[in-house]
Image: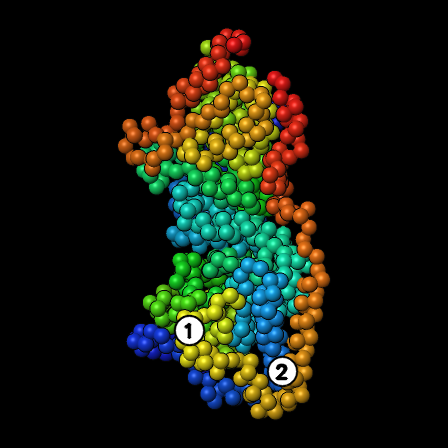
Amino acid sequence: MPGNEAGSAVTEMTYRQALHDTLRAEMLRDESVFLIGEEIGIFEGSYKITAGLLEEFGPRRVRDTPISEEGFVGAAIGAAMLGLRPVVELMTINFSLLAIDQIVNHAAKIHAMFGGQIAVPMVIRTPGGGGQQLGATHSQNIEVYYAHIPGLKVVAPSTPADAKGLLASAIRDSDPVLLVENLALYNTKGQVPEGEHLTEIGRAAVAREGSDVTVVAYSHTVGIALDVATRLQAEGISVEVVDLRSLRPLDRSTVCASVRKTTRAVVIEDDWLSYGVGAEVVATIQEGAFYSLDAPVRRVAAAEVPLPYSKSLESAALPDARDLVKVIRETLDATGFAASGDRCA
Amino acid sequence: MPINAGTKTSRSSSNRAKPRSAPVRPDAGASEMQRMTVESPETLLGYYSQMVLIRSFEQRAAEMYTRAKIGGYCHLNLGEEATVVGLMAALEPRDYLFTTYREHGYALCRGIDSGRVMAELFGKSTGVSGGWGGSMHLFDTEARLLGGYGIVGGQIPPATGAALAIAYRSEPGPDAEAVMCLMGDGTTNIGAFHESLNLASIWHLPIVYVVINNGLGMGTTVQAASGEPELYKRGCSYRIPGVRVDGDDVVAVRDAAREALESARVDRQPRLLEAVSARLRGHSVVDPARYRSAQDVERAQELDPVANLRSKLLGEGVMDPTMAADVEAEAEAEVARAVAFAEGSPLPPVSELFAHSYATPVPNCPGNLPGESPFGSSLASSIAGAGK
């Protein structure tokens, strides 16, 4: 494949493959890295991220667990305290609730609560996301529960390249990192740099440059935002897309720099509206870019119901491209925006 | 002799029939006397001195709490000094200890300076956890005290994981490391206890779980809270052998713990040890324990391990009244020094509020005080630069 802008080689692969290859590379690089979780070995992972790794590395490095989220997440914490670098797979983010005491009261606290004497270098990988007809308990986007907690780092890659870069950074980081994957992204493809590729935790990316409105997105909704940006370009509307990538820490300056340029902003998020990631982003924008705004900042988020099973109801409850287009148009109309680039009211 | 789960199956129905009865202790009897006579006087005096130090420390901690020198919650080891000293005598310096929020005595017995322990209670920067943890969260990497934990049973999964790390990196054997994980009686009813024992069993981890059964989880009796109140049996579902020992017998506790640790080290067989003791005071300093009957309190006082060991050592000529007075005076003096050290130490400066936010610094970490913008001093420039 031809090189990327940095000049290094890239390969096209799925998000799933990027995660798999990164786990393997990090295990080869560092003997202290090991995998732990339900069905990750013989079963090769519920979503096959760990396929082949038990065979290659053996049960010491790829440790199948019983159904005991609180037990094995907590065990990873203790192993990390003794200097290992466990990478936990939680089958879905919904099951993290069974381990929330260990994540919030222990992983997040141990470094600070004991006066900085010890680190907890662990990663929890877990997919979130709805739209798979899995019903109310298996379709949630509850990353904001963890993004609220000092002591944790929470990242949510939207591309195969960032899946690689953020997972590698998370494994080498000495703090507990929750890496939120997404069921709808596993089969998506993208260009991934070969060899060493680290994405810095705590930095957002401008996924597409534009001048009329900023769409802030993360994980699965970045793809929606990029599709909408392409569609609206044909109408003369220039959309900038900011991919948060990291929910804690949140890169407030990249978000505000974009909004100061475009003067309008919309957030699209798969989680629920009230107290969601978008609420924090909107608060950030009003504090950091208030005098640049030409319109109220809007949010496109999931309907506030437990997600239904039936396709008609589930689709209606989740934000999609049509919802985003509608809200972008309303945001532009509110300021008398005329497509074709004439931004005078 | 300690009671073994599986070898002596006294039905628990007798306990059920008398729901307020205290846990049955193993009958020490003659065997205790035998053990006492084979122990060197120096060893026994050493244990006694440590027990007296814990007693003095905790009494002063209670006093400092009522004088508002200590904040938050403060749980004392009063009444379980023999258990603390016995367990710590068995634990080797290379072993790791995870414990509960009732842990001052353990920190002292792991060799941590009493001044640093008291300073932590005072919230001072010289405290073992730099003033970040308080009474419930003592920690010292060097002493391998990997934490007092404030959430009941929160320490059990990480302790199990520490044992996993030992098994990951080293082979079993008499010189291997092991983990001791302490908990109270009430903890044996939480899910993390059962999940962790199961993991330790299937993974053959070098860990000893110790239940300190003082008969009360706050105000709830073990009998009222537990389907199987003979707590040493609660590892049976996971084929983890359990032993009950008299927690007021320091040598018996030490021997049982040593035997369990040996099994964990050499055979990678996790073990469960129940030490039966009595709480001399309330659940915490502020608890007047009105729920306890006069007889229960009286019985706890009769079992006072410090007073009883004192009488025994005097009776057997291991120490004379002058030595006993010296031990008490030394403990008082050390605790007085600890209080003075804590009093004289500085509070952590506000400039260190974000010092331990993360072990690996990354961009954009929040560091704003209440009322400050997350944009910090750059807010003004961000507004000033608002031009499009």
The residue closer to the viewer here, A333 or A85, is A333
- The residue located at (48%, 73%) in the rendering is B279
- The residue located at (52%, 50%) in the rendering is A107
Badge 1 marks a residue whose secondary structure is loop
Q: Which residue is mark 2?
A: B45
**Compared with residue B13, is residue B387 higher up or lower down, i.e. above or below?**
above
The residue closer to the viewer here, B186 or A290, is A290
Residue B234's image quarter?
bottom left
Badges 2 and 1: C-beta atoms under 8 Å apart?
Answer: no
Residue B32 point in image, percent of width and height: 50, 86
Residue A197 point in image, percent of width and height: 59, 34
- The residue located at (46%, 84%) in the rendering is B28
Task: Please rate how many residues cluster around mark 1, counting C-alpha atoms within 10 Å: few if below 14, some from 14 to 19, many from 20.
Answer: some
The residue closer to the viewer here, B350 or B2, is B350
What separation in Å lies between label 2 and label 1 (alpha carbons)?
Answer: 33 Å
Camera sees residue B239: no
- The residue located at (60%, 77%) in the rendering is B52
**Compared with residue A151, is residue B54 higher up or lower down, i.e. above or below?**
below
Q: Chain of mark 1?
A: B
The residue closer to the viewer here, B385 or A59, is B385
Residue B376's image quarter?
top right
**Compared with residue A285, is residue A64 higher up or lower down, i.e. above or below?**
below
